[in-house]
Amino acid sequence: MEIKLICIGKTDDIELRKIISNYENRLKHYVKFNFLYLPDQKGTKNLSQEQQKAKEGLLIEKHLKTSDAVVLLDENGKQFSSVSFSEFLNKKMSSGCKRLVFIIGGPYGFAKTLHQKYTAKISLSKMTFSHQMIRMIFVEQLYRANTILRNEPYHHR
């Protein structure tokens, strides 16, 4: 199974990029994983938040396949412990899913159309983090989940 994380905008902070890269390299031993960084939308200064989310939603949709299992990383989504997240991943892997796509929306979240079409939502915390930090947190949790599934000592129970 392939796992993809779609994000709007680049990770500007060099230290976060180093940490993300470290976990990406670790993940290569477990699963095919890749990031897709979509460009920040240009000309949004005169757009409402809803218009900007709709524009980003159309861009995101261009990179999804009908066969994808899509999960929105959303503040109102279901929260998991690291162990239960690993169980969620294991179920997806066992289900025959070819590509599991997680999406981090733009600065204002997701368009209503994406919320309606993709009902699977996960929240990584009740706290608010920058979108760039969420990328790092997510990739670390993805790595942690894979080590849990293989009973490796990275995660202490």
Image (cartoon, rainbow, N blue to C red):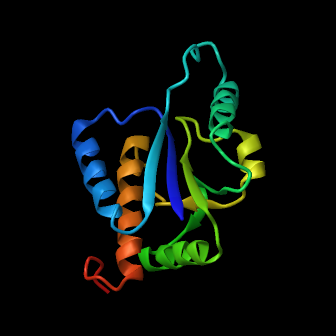
Q: Quadrant of residue 156?
A: bottom left
Residue 70 lies left or right of residue 90; in this view the side is right
Instruction: Specify the quadrant that holds the C terminus.
Output: bottom left
Instruction: Specify the quadrant that holds the N terminus.
Output: bottom right
Residue 16 lies left or right of residue 94; in this view the side is left
- The picture places residue 120, in percent across and down from the top left corner, at 67, 61
Q: Quadrant of residue 91?
A: bottom right
Residue 14 lies left or right of residue 54; in this view the side is left
Image height check: is 11 above or below 75?
Answer: above
Image height check: is 76 above or below 110?
Answer: below
Residue 11 visible in the displayed image: yes
* Residue depicted at 29% across the width and 56% down the height: 25
* Residue depicted at 74% across the width and 42% down the height: 112
Residue 35 lies left or right of residue 105; in this view the side is left
* Residue depicted at 47% across the width and 76% down the height: 86
- The picture places residue 2, in percent across and down from the top left corner, at 52, 59
User: Which residue is more in the foreground, 133 or 100?
Assistant: 100
Residue 74 visible in the displayed image: no
Q: Quadrant of residue 59?
A: top right
- The picture places residue 6, in percent across and down from the top left corner, at 52, 44
Count of marks placed on residues: 0
User: Which residue is more in the foreground, 110 or 102?
Assistant: 102
- The picture places residue 77, in percent across and down from the top left corner, at 61, 60
Image height check: is 96 above or below 109?
Answer: below
Image height check: is 88 above or below 122?
Answer: below
